[in-house]
Image (tube, rainbow, N blue to C red):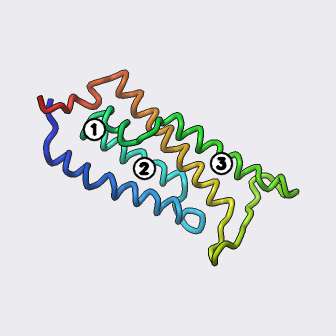
Amino acid sequence: MRHSVILRTAARLLVPLMLLFSVFLLLRGHNETGGGFIGGLVAGISFALYAIAYGTAASRAALRTTPQQLMAVGLGIAVVSALLPLLGGGALLEGLWVQWQGIKLGSPVLFDVGVYLLVIGVTLVVIYELEEHNPRLFPDVSLG
């Protein structure tokens, strides 16, 4: 089965926009609606769209790492940000803030980044495993 040129063109244009939007949601989340979870879902869905348009192998190549590595790094970042306040005598998951070159940085943002990477990894593991066990989920996209 061949995919339409429209789907491939749309995916090529939408995936970068979706990834940019996911980063916006990530960075906005600790002050307003959004955050690491919804940003990670949007990023994961963007790679799923790419897999539908170009195939799972192309999506895995575009990711440039494995979903399991994203999950491990994300979980590590989230755990470190949660435990960091304990070193200073604070409570688990207590927010720590530092001022750096006029920018206020905090551990909640670090935790959100960990959740973001973890959610991308989990989403892609599910998508890729579904495709692996049901190859007709993303039909053959070869042009030959």
Q: Secondary structure at mark 3?
A: helix
Image quadrant occupied by the C terminus: top left
Which three-letter amino acid code belongs to the residue tagged 2?
A: Ala
Which three-letter amino acid code belongs to the residue tagged 3?
A: Ala
What residue does disc 1 label?
Answer: 52
The residue under the point 42% across, 45% down is 44
Q: Residues within 10 Å of mark 3 (few under 14, many from 20)?
A: many
The circle on residue 125 is none
Q: CA distance from mark 3 to mark 2?
A: 18 Å
> On the image, which quarter does residue 101 sit in?
bottom right
Q: Is residue 63 above or below residue 106?
A: above
The residue under the point 34% across, 58% down is 17
Which three-letter amino acid code belongs to the residue tagged 1?
A: Ile
Q: Is residue 50 above or below residue 112?
A: above
Question: Is 106 situated left or right of 16 in this image?
Answer: right
The circle on residue 43 is 2
- Label 2–label 1 contact, CB within 8 A: no
The residue under the point 48% across, 44% down is 120
Q: Secondary structure at mark 2?
A: helix
State which tag comes first along the sequence, 2 or 1.
Answer: 2
What residue does disc 3 label?
Answer: 78
Q: Is residue 115 above or below residue 25?
A: above
State which tag comes first along the sequence, 3 or 2.
Answer: 2
> On the image, which quarter does residue 126 sit in?
top left
The x, y position of residue 61, in whole percent, is 36, 37
Q: Is residue 28 above or below residue 52?
A: below
> Could you say which is closer to the camera, residue 22 or residue 62?
62
The x, y position of residue 10, in whole percent, is 22, 51
